[in-house]
Image (tube, helix red, strand yellow):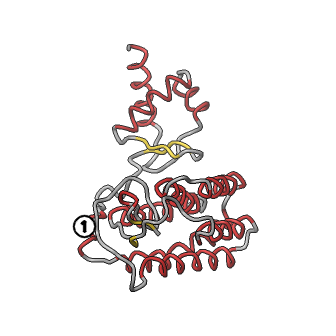
C-alpha cells in the first residue's frame, strides 16, 4: 500500500511539474517509469487510478494523455432526440464519414488496416445481429481513429453517441443473423481496400455508397422506425430482441 501511494505521489508530482497541457501526450511507459522512478507495473496501476480521477486518459496504441479525454462530457446525445430524426443522422453521416475515409487513406497505418480487415472478417462470421452490429460499429470507429486526428475522431464519437441514443430499424424476423449477401459486407471490404490502396477519392466514394445503401435500407417508406431505449453497441440498425434489424 505504501509503495502504491508513493507511486501516485511521484506521478502526481511529475504531472504538476512537467508543464504539459490538457491532451498533451506523456512519454512512453518505459520512459515515464524511469522518470518517476518506479516499475512499469507500478506505473500502470497508478495511471489507472489517475484515469478514473480524470487526470489522464489513455488511447490503445497511441499512448497516455494529460487531462480528461472527453471534451464531450457536457454533450448529451439524448438532448438531440427531440430535435432530429433518423434521416438527420444518416445525412450527417453522409456529410462527415466520406471525409474520414479519405483521410484514413492518407494516414492509416498497416496495423490500422489489418485491424479493419480482421473485424470485417469477423462480421461475416457473426452468429447474431448483435454480434454483427458490434463489428459494424468497430469498423467505422477504426476508420475514424486511423485518421490520427483527435479532433475528427472525437467528432465521430459525438455522432456515434447520437446513433446510440436513437435506435431505429425495419421489422424483420426471418433471420437471426445477416444473410451472406448482406450489403454491408462487400461495402465495408471495398472501403477498406480503397484505404489500403491509399486512394482517398475511392475511399470517400465507397463510404458514400455504403451510407446510401444504409439510407435505402432504413428510410424506405415500408421501414418501421421508432425511438427506443439505447443499448450497448453501436450499429446502423437496432436488433431489439431480434425484432429489428437491417
Picture residue at 48% right of the left edge, 45% below the top: 65
Q: Give above or below for 221 relative to 156.
A: below
| Crowd band around label 1 with a 10 angstrom C-alpha radius: few (<14), some (14–19), many (20+) | few
Picture residue at 41% right of the left edge, 19% below the top: 4
Picture residue at 40% right of the left edge, 73% below the top: 170
Q: Give above or below for 57 relative to 161.
A: above
Q: Where's residue 22, x and y in %?
A: 42, 50
- The residue sitting at the right extreme is 197
Foreground residue among 178 and 158: 178
Q: Secondary structure at mark 1?
A: helix
Q: Left or right: where does residue 217 sit relative to residue 74? A: right
Would you name the residue on which mark 1 appears? 79
Placement of the N terminus among the 4 image quadrants = top left
- The residue sitting at the bottom extreme is 221
Quarter occupied by residue 185: bottom right
Q: Where's residue 200, x and y in %?
A: 68, 74
Amino acid at each position: 500500500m505504501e509503495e502504491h501511494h508513493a507511486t501516485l505521489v511521484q506521478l502526481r508530482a511529475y504531472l504538476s511539474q512537467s508543464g504539459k497541457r490538457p491532451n498533451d501526450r506523456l512519454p512512453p511507459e518505459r520512459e515515464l517509469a524511469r522518470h518517476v522512478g518506479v516499475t512499469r507495473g507500478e506505473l500502470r496501476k497508478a495511471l489507472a487510478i489517475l484515469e478514473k480521477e480524470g487526470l489522464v486518459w489513455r488511447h490503445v496504441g497511441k499512448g497516455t494523455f494529460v487531462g480528461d479525454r472527453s471534451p464531450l462530457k457536457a454533450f448529451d446525445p439524448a438532448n438531440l432526440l427531440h430535435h432530429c430524426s433518423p434521416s438527420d443522422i444518416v445525412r450527417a453521416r453522409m456529410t462527415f464519414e466520406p471525409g474520414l475515409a479519405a483521410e484514413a487513406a492518407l494516414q492509416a497505418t498497416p496495423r490500422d488496416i489489418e485491424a479493419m480487415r480482421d473485424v470485417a472478417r469477423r462480421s461475416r462470421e457473426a452468429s447474431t445481429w448483435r454480434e454483427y452490429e458490434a463489428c459494424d460499429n468497430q469498423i467505422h470507429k477504426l476508420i475514424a481513429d486511423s485518421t490520427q486526428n483527435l479532433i475528427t475522431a472525437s467528432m465521430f464519437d459525438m455522432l456515434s453517441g447520437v446513433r446510440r441514443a436513437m435506435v431505429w430499424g425495419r421489422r424483420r424476423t426471418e433471420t437471426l443473423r445477416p444473410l451472406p449477401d448482406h450489403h454491408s459486407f462487400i461495402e465495408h471490404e471495398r472501403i477498406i481496400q480503397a484505404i489500403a490502396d491509399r486512394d482517398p477519392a475511392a475511399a470517400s466514394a465507397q463510404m458514400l455508397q455504403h451510407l446510401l445503401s444504409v439510407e435505402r435500407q432504413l428510410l424506405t417508406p415500408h421501414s418501421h422506425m421508432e425511438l427506443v431505449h439505447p443499448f450497448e453497441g453501436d450499429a446502423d440498425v437496432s436488433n431489439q430482441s431480434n425484432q429489428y434489424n437491417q
